Image (cartoon, helix red, strand yellow):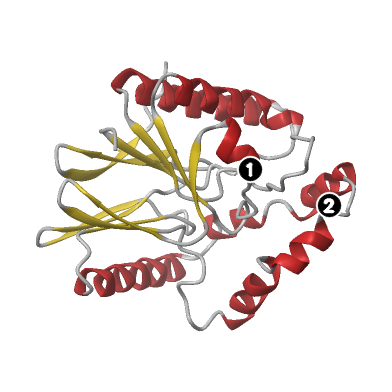
Amino acid sequence: MKRPLYFISDVHFYLREDAVEQEKTAKVSQLIDSVIAKQGTLFIVGDFFDFWFEYGSVVPRSYFNILAKLREMTQAGCKLHYIGGNHDFWLGDFIINNLSATVYNKPAELTIDNKRFYIAHGDGIDPADKGYLFLQKILRNKFFIKLFSFIPPGLAFNLAKLVSGTSRKYDNNSTEILRQNRKQLRTFAGEKFAEGFDCVVLGHYHLPEEYHTGDKTYLNCGDWLKHFTYGVFEEGKLRLEYVKNSD
């Protein structure tokens, strides 16, 4: 696997082509340029797109530029790994064949430079969230996916626009809820450390964090709606980085 490794999650590219999305595309493209320059590997840790469903011959036009940038990256010799989130878990042949991506439908457990990595989007961590866990099983059921494929692409994309914005719920939480979420994520990471993992990489909660305990590291990639953060693994160390303003 090519180093350095870059980790990005919760970009939430929306099905629209406005100035906000154009700026977001420019910032992510800036990061991809860094991956290309260093001939590294990019890990997408879920919710890169706010909605993704693969039809046989249709790709949302608003995603064209960023898809082309990812293709440029892999054609330049870099590697792409994609772990589905709760908004973009319906990954398929397009991502694999056209972007030369390695796709994971469950958390990735990898050994890199003698360190054991646990990499997951982070949805479903809370065992008390039984409603979501039940819905997750339905949405990822092959029969349901087949039924959804009969919805015309234009209608499916319009439905996605109607329900879009749920990703922002984590940006509006109270200080106490954010504190509880951070504690829960650190506890989860600690459980993985106890299982023998050295590095835990998560997303989903839009809570950028680099947390060390001994020689173990937990990193939350944050988001690209508010924080514009990503992770880097280089020379045996995992760290959190913030996008620098071009001005």
Q: Which residue is mark 2?
A: 159
Label annotation for residue 48: none
Circle 1 sits in a helix, a strand or a loop, which is it?
Answer: helix
Of circles 1 and 2, which is in front?
1
Q: Earlier in the sequence, mark 1 or mark 2?
A: 1
The number of callouts visible is 2
Compared across the picture, whether 114 is left or right of 186 comes to left
Q: What residue do we see at 68% from left, 48% from top?
A: 51
Q: Is residue 34 above or below residue 86?
A: above
Residue 124: image x %, image y %?
51, 71
Q: What residue do we see at 56% from left, 30% from top?
A: 24
Estimate the spatial distance between the alpha carbons at disc 1 and disc 2, rounded to whole Å: 23 Å
Q: Is residue 53 above or below residue 242?
A: below
Q: What residue do we see at 42% from left, 49% from top?
A: 222
In the picture, which quadrant includes the C terminus?
Answer: top left
Compared across the picture, whether 137 is left or right of 123 comes to right
| Residue 71 quadrant | top right
Residue 203: image x %, image y %?
44, 55
Q: Which residue is mark 1?
A: 93
Q: What residue do we see at 47% from left, 21% from top?
A: 75
